Each structure stands twice: as C-alpha cells, then as structure tokens.
Image (spheres, rainbow, N blue to C red):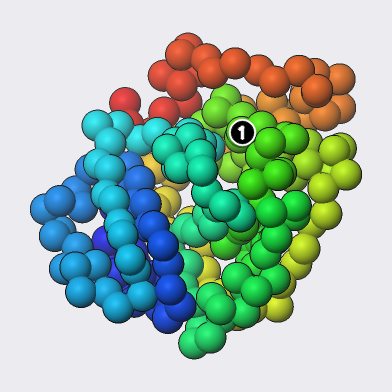
C-alpha cells in the first residue's frame, strides 16, 4: 500500500534485470500506473500481479518462485520498502550463487537471493507464517539443516522496516496477534520437534490471522 516506496525501490535498480515480478498485495498498482516501469532501462521484462487479498510474504515469495521454475541461478526477493545504493545491486549479484542464500541490508531478508539448488533441497517457504514474520527465520534454519551456506553481503541496501504497518495504525493490533501466533508456531516447529515436518497451508489459520478481514 506504499507505492511511493515501491517507486523508490525500482528507481534504485541500476543493473540489468531479466524478469521483475511485483506481487501487488495492496491491489492498487494498476491505479497507480507504475509509469517508472515502462521505460526502465535496466528491466528487460516485468509482470504486475494484483491480488484480491493479501497473500502474505511466504505465499508471495512462493508464487514468484513457482511462476519462474526455470530460473537459472535463483530468485532475488526484495521488500518494496528497500532500495539499493548506486552499484549495490551489481555487487550483490556478484556474490550470489545457486548453492547459497545471500542476504543484504537489515534485517537481512529485506534483500535475499535464494539459489536454485537451495529451493531444490529445502523446498518453499512455510505459508502458515501468515501474513508476515518468521517465514524467513524458519526457511533459513531449514536451509542450515541441509548444510546450505548463508552469505552476508556488504552491498549497501537500505530498508524502511515495517512500512506497511507504519502506514496504517489499524494494522498494529492485527500485527501483534499474527506476530505472536507466528512466533509460537516457529518455537513449536523448532523447540518441540515439529520440524522436519512441513506443515500444509491452513485455511483456518489464514482467515484467523489475516490483516484483510
């Protein structure tokens, strides 16, 4: 819902991108128009998918991965409220590998590259962490359990943390509920031995924790 931050993010791209996918969980990108994409010199192809409801972080990332299964090296997952300093994207790309998870910025998963071979071994993100928080921690621990290296890049990536919540005070209460529930799920999976079982997506949990009720 902060398309001004999305614009800033895209304007910071100064290195060639083959395919850019925008998962529009706010459903308003078509009204915004995204004029900064049409003539972007570094983006070869782009797709904007407006969702009828908020898919959440894990589901959005999974959708992007499943929609581009033939990606050669992997997938760069970038928060819309993050942006690159000049030259940072090229540096970051140079440190990525099909066999690693590469993180930049703070928190690290605001800009993350998940290698193709990582997804082949680990699978997708757990969508029961809805709509946000702990899906990245869970995936990282699963990757480490498979011996996947985690690379921390020094590329300068900036991030305005939790911009969606900050833009709408009514979301704070909903976030407090979903954050606690996701934290409890994370602890159960890792402290109580639920892992390596990969929990299937739950309709009940999706409806209970959604911010779009």
Look at the numbered disc 1 and give the secondary structure of its residue. Answer: loop
**Residue 167 in sight here:** no
Q: Is residue 163 above or below residue 86?
A: above
Q: Is residue 104 above or below residue 191?
A: below
Tell me the quadrant of the picture where the C terminus can be found.
top left
Q: Residue at x 46, y 21 (%)?
A: 206
Left or right: where 78 falls relative to 44: right
Q: How crowded is mark 1: few (under 14 residues within 10 Å), some or many (20 or more)?
A: some
* Residue 107: percent from left, percent from top: 64, 61
Depth check: give the residue in front, 73 or 200: 73
Residue found farthest to the bottom: 86
Q: Name the residue under label 1.
A: 124
Does 89 sit above or below residue 29? below
Residue that protrudes farthest toward the top in the picture: 204
Residue 176's spot in the image, x, y percent?
Answer: 53, 38
Total label count? 1
The residue at 85%/38% (across/down) is 146
Q: Where is residue 57 in the image (x, y as percent from the top left)?
A: 49, 41
């Amino acid at each position: 819902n902060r398309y001004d931050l999305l614009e800033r993010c895209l304007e910071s791209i100064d290195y060639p991108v083959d395919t850019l996918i925008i998962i529009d969980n706010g459903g308003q990108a078509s009204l915004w128009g995204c004029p900064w994409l049409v003539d972007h010199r570094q983006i070869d192809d782009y797709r904007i998918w407006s969702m009828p409801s908020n898919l959440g972080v894990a589901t959005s990332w999974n959708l992007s991965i499943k929609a581009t299964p033939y990606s050669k090296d992997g997938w760069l997952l970038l928060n819309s409220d993050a942006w690159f300093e000049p030259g940072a994207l090229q540096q970051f790309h140079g440190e990525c590998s099909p066999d690693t998870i590469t993180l930049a910025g703070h928190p690290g998963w605001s800009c993350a590259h998940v290698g193709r071979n990582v997804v082949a071994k680990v699978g997708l993100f757990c969508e029961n962490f809805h709509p946000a928080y702990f899906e990245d921690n869970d995936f990282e621990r699963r990757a480490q359990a498979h011996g996947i290296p985690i690379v921390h890049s020094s590329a300068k990536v900036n991030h305005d943390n939790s911009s969606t919540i900050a833009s709408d005070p009514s979301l704070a209460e909903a976030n407090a509920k979903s954050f606690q529930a996701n934290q409890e799920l994370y602890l159960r999976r890792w402290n109580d031995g639920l892992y390596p079982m990969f929990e299937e997506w739950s309709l009940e949990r999706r409806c209970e924790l959604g911010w779009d009720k």
